[in-house]
Amino acid sequence: MKYGTPALPAPTELRTRLCEGIELTGEVKFTEVMRVETKIAGKVFSDSGSLVVSEKGYVQATIEAGFVEVFGTVEGTITAKYKVEIHSGGRVTGDIYTPNLNIEHGAFFDGKCHMTT
């Protein structure tokens, strides 16, 4: 295994979708893939699933997941076992812990990145 390469492919089957009009406060646990199109505050956790924060998504939480993709806004600490991607237009304010980080041109990141193995 090469350094920075995920041992497993990112889950691709969307299992959970939190749409506009819902606001969650507390702890959210999920498996496979969860797409957030609304506001979540608290803690978001998955053993090895993928969290996708859409353009309209706003997550103010501690995040632990296998993969994290940000198109919207995240405020808080992100810990990803495999990879974090901040896409153009995405905003992350907080520290990131991951072995693989990709920040696209046009994305915003304010925090510290801790590269893990």
Image (tube, helix red, strand yellow):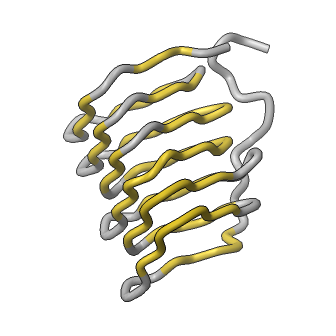
Locate residue 63, reporting x and y percent: 54, 46
Q: Is residue 105 above or below residue 69?
A: above
Locate residue 33, reporting x and y percent: 66, 62
Q: Is residue 59 left or right of 92 when viewed as pictured? A: right
Residue visible at 38% across and 41% down? 86
Q: Is residue 107 above or below residue 116?
A: below
Q: Is residue 65 left or right of 108 when viewed as pictured? A: right
Q: Is residue 53 left or right of 71 when viewed as pictured? A: right
Locate residue 59, reporting x and y percent: 39, 58
Residue visible at 67% across and 70% down? 14
Which of the pair 15/21 is nearer the observer? 21
Residue visible at 28% across and 39% down? 93
Q: Assign the N terminus to one quadrant of the image.
A: top right
Residue visible at 60% across and 62% down? 27
Looking at the image, the residue that sits furthest to the bottom is 21
Locate residue 5, reporting x and y percent: 67, 22
Q: Assign the C terminus to one quadrant of the image.
A: top right
Total marks drawn?
0
